[in-house]
């Protein structure tokens, strides 16, 4: 899971060719272990990631999750307690 968006995505050093080909496939979650659609999407995401690793396909696609609750917890706490 991405913990530092700026470091991982915005400040990543790429050659011009890599920059043209680089793709991020991100899902934004609220919490892990959610039932229903969230669980299904998480399963498909993991299966797709594992398949690309296994087959060596899509070398320019990077996969990650962003936990919305984790990313916004500090700003939410500040807003609620201000």
Image: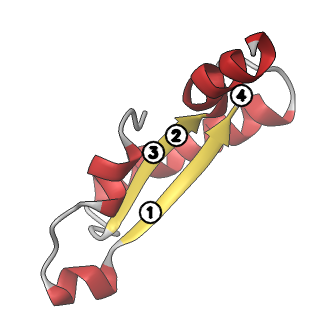
Mark nearer the N terminus (4 vs 1): 1
Say if 25 sits above or below 77 in the image. Answer: below
Task: Give 37 or 66, whichever is nearer the viewer.
Answer: 66
Q: Mark 3 highlights which residue?
A: 64
Say if 21 sits above or below 12 in the image. Answer: below
Mark nearer the N terminus (1 vs 2): 1
Residue at screen point 61% across, 47% down: 27
Mark nearer the N terminus (3 vs 1): 1
Contact? badges 4 and 1 (CB < 8 Å): no
For label 1, count other residues whose C-alpha is less than 10 Å away and answer few (under 14), some (14-19) or many (20+).
Answer: few
Task: Tell me how far mark 3 sits from mark 1, CA to CA.
Answer: 8 Å
Residue at screen point 69% across, 15% down: 77
Outermost residue, top side: 81
Residue 24 is labelled as: 1
Q: Mark 2 highlights which residue?
A: 65
The answer to which quarter of the image holds residue 18 is bottom left
Residue 31 in sight here? no
Quarter holding the C terminus? top right
């Amino acid at each position: 899971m991405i913990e530092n968006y700026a470091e991982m995505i915005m400040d990543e050093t790429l050659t011009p060719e890599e920059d043209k080909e680089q793709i991020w496939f991100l899902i934004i979650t609220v919490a892990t272990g959610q039932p229903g659609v969230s669980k299904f999407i998480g399963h498909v995401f993991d299966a797709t990631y594992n398949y690309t690793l296994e087959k060596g396909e899509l070398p320019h696609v990077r996969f990650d999750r962003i936990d919305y609750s984790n990313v916004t917890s500090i700003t939410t706490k500040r807003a609620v307690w201000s």
